[in-house]
Image (cartoon, grey):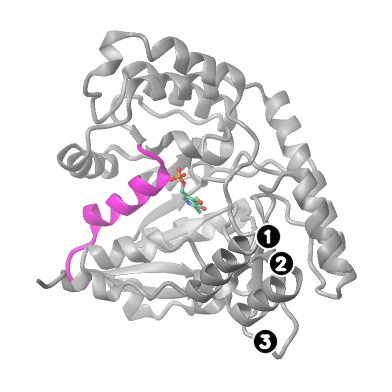
Amino acid sequence: MKIAKRLEKIPPYLFVEISKKIAQKKSQGIEIINFGIGDPDLPTPTPVINELQKTSLINANHRYPETDGLPEFRQSIQKWYKNRFNLSFNPDTEILPLIGAKEGIGHTAFCFIDNGDIALIPDPGYPVYSVGTWFAGGECYTMPLTEDNQWLPDLNAIPEDIARKAKVMWLNYPNNPTSAIANKEYFNKVVDFAKSYEIIVLHDACYTEVSYDDYQPISFMEIPGAKDIALEFHSLSKSYNMTGWRVGYVVGNQKLINPLMIVKSNLDSGIPQAIQSMAMTALNTTQESINKRNQIYQNRRDKIVEALNSLGLNVEKPKASLYIWAKIPSGYSSAQYATKLLDEKNIVVTPGSGYGSYGEGYIRLSLTIPDDQLDKGIDKLIN
Ligand SMILES: Cc1ncc(COP(=O)(O)O)c(C=O)c1O
């Protein structure tokens, strides 16, 4: 038996040792405080769950859904975009529901990447951008995200021949793992760059609804001309505490949405309809309750940042996303530092190197940890 060559490109799982240690400690009854996972601990809102209970009883919802979802769901996405960003998308041609953003991101590579094609990939970054590219037979060109450039790809550093060959550029703001945000001025430069080299921009906007201190993240689609060249991915996972329900969507130019519809309709059968009904209810969540939820994360952010700063790590408060991105002391790799925290303090953090080689030297802590656990974790950290 021989597995496909494309799987050989997948880097080995970096955290094998850490995962083993966690399992070992747990089996010894040691309490582990986990800042590693970016998965909301807060429940899916009650009206959304009530909607599932109601709509799961409807017989039509027991049957195959359509790949492009219920027309009402696409219309509710249209309404949400209009309310949130004052942008209009045609619900029949410019909006496509996804089984979570991850599914759409992975499948998108098959729409635009042929053997040997180049995708511009941020590093550190969400690993699915590069894995999807490899699965489609493409090559990843790394765009380093560095503190010096506010964790934004330096467009001038992309060599001319690479820019000419590149088919797509992946971006993600608010960013995982660095928590960086992008402003309109930067996005304008991206639109100009992409247009001049005929590059498709794929913007992962999964964290636009998790923000702090009155900051409101922007949409890439707000930039004049963006709709000609870009897709924007959204997820209900982080926006409405719905990671377990698997629902997201993508908006953009019909010419770019169509290929994804072709790929998806041949590979998946859409989102269960009762879950689409949940998503419609979620998209009607008031800004007030989102603000309340964000205030919980903000309080956690403030506590963790204060604790890390008291340890001398010099961390800034992020304006958005679910993560604290902290530079570690010199003399350790990020995996070594994460292992040290696990060995000495029974705390799990994610080594930055798991998001690419430019993540080396950093660790990521997630704010999706219940308050009592967070307090215990901070106590262990600083004592
Ligand atoms: C940047 C980024 N994009 C996409 C996803 C996946 O979102 P979904 O749960 O909708 O698949 C995540 C999840 O952690 C993420 O961090």
Name the mark on residue 346. 2
Q: Nearer the viewer, residue 29 or 312?
A: 29
* Relative side of 305 to 224, left or right: right
**Is ligand 1 closer than 8 angstroms to the Cβ of mark 2?**
no
Q: Residues within 10 Å of mark 3 (few under 14, many from 20)?
A: some
Q: Give the crowd class for mark 2: few <14, some 14-19, many >=20 residues within 10 Å.
A: many
Relative to residue 213, is residue 237 drawn left or right?
left
Callout 3 amino acid: Tyr
Q: Which residue is drawn at 69% across and 48% down?
A: 369
* Residue 82 higher or lower than 29, as above or below: above
Residue at point 78%, 44% (across, down) = 371
Q: Is the C-beta separation of discs 1 and 2 under 8 Å?
A: yes
Q: First in sequence, mark 1 or 3: give its number.
A: 1
Q: In this view, does 56 lie above or below 142?
A: above
- Residue at which label 1 appears: 32
Q: Which residue lies furthest to the front in this view?
A: 28
Q: Is residue 36 left or right of residue 142?
A: right
Q: Distance between the residues labelled 2 and 3?
A: 18 Å
Q: Quadrant of residue 248?
A: top left
Residue 141 visible in rendering: yes
Q: Main secondary structure of the magenta part?
A: helix
Q: Are marks 1 and 3 in contact (CB under 8 Å)?
A: no
Residue 340 vs 48, above or below: the answer is: below
List the residue tagged with mark 3: 332
> What is the span of residues highlighted in magenta in the rendered image?
99-116
Give the alpha-carbon distance from disc 1 to disc 2, as whole Å: 5 Å
